[in-house]
Amino acid sequence: MSEDKPPSRPSLFKIFDKFFPKTLKPRAQLMQALEEAEENLVIDPYSRSVIEGALQVESLKVRDVMVPRSKMIMISSEASTKNLLQIMVASSHSRFPIHNEEQDSILGVILAKDLLAHLANNQDDEFNYREYLRDALSVPESKPLGALLREFQQNKSHMAIVLDEYGEIAGLVTLEDVIEQIVGEIEDEHDKEEDNIIDYGDGRFLLQANTTLSEFNDFFDSNIKSDDYDTVAGLVISGFSYLPEQLSEISLHGFQFKVLKTDNRRLHLLEVQHQTSDEKLKDN
């Protein structure tokens, strides 16, 4: 007489056949399938957020996550060893673009560990950064994040210089910036609290969705008030009357809001611009 066997768990392939049929589904249906998978304990909430983040990466551009030029920490090609060390210690970064005298071109990237190794062995000699200069990967603002991630992997790079349509320096983007779009914020003991509102130039501003209306009003000299919510996220969700999807746009109080990062629970990152007169007339 054979013993009763415990019920076997469905294979991973059967699970994906159930929740992700072979027929291509629109994005909304795919998100619904992920929600059902979580409800049926096929995946946990964190796994769902990672999958959603991976999908979001494919629809974002480099300009959506880059550090704008005004926030970049670059080092002059004329900097002394003492200057290099001071900048590196103050910033707590590990990679630094080296620019030419005109500050319109990046010569390459140096690593903090190379300077530290030099100081450990040659304390009295000036650090010749050219001996350690690494090529800087350059990418356009319009490059999809998914393609950039693959390029980072192929080139074994951790940083890229972002160029605008005229080939001028627009900012920089790191491997960590891309990965954070998938798994969420990665903070370490050196991370400093970032500004809630960052000027990207061209009339575009990057905005943390949990920015208070009070801070928003102070920054933009506006007068948005509500008894129902006190953050910009609340303002935007109220305008849609539901939690909007990534890249959704809405015009509110003379501003154009674009959702850059969200999950199934809340908004994280927004882009905001002042509406032009023509746009305001169109909305009215």
Image (tube, rainbow, N blue to C red):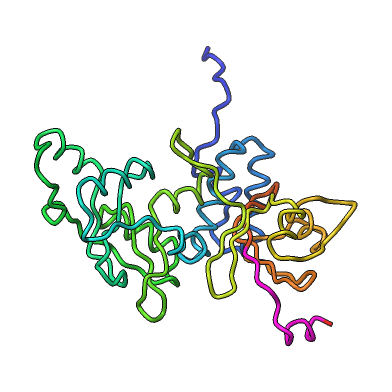
Of 4 and 83, the residue lying toward us: 83
Residue at the (73%, 70%) spot, across then down = 250
Q: Quadrant of residue 76?
A: bottom left
Is 184 part of what is drawn in magenta? no
Asked which quadrant contains residue 238, the reply is: bottom right
Q: Nearer the viewer, residue 44 or 244?
A: 244
**Residue 272 falls inside the magenta stretch:** yes
Query: Is residue 260 found left or right of 232 in the rendered image?
Result: left
In the image: residue 106, left or right of residue 169: left
Which residue appears at 72% of the width and 59% of the height? 218
Name the spot of residue 268 as percent of width and height, x first.
63, 51
Q: How many marks?
A: 0
Front residue of 18/181: it is 181
Quadrant into which the C terminus falls:
bottom right
Residue extending farthest right: 227
Residue at 33%, 55% in the rendered image: 159
Q: Which residues are magenta?
A: 271-283
Position above or below: 85 against 105: above
Q: Nearer the viewer, residue 97 or 283?
A: 97
> Is 105 left or right of 42, judged from the image as shown?
left
| Residue 213 in view of the camera | yes
Judge whether residue 30 can be spotted in this image: no
Q: Residue at x 35, y 58 (%)?
A: 150
Q: Quadrant of residue 273?
A: bottom right
Counting from the top left corner in percent of width and height, residue 11 is at 50, 37
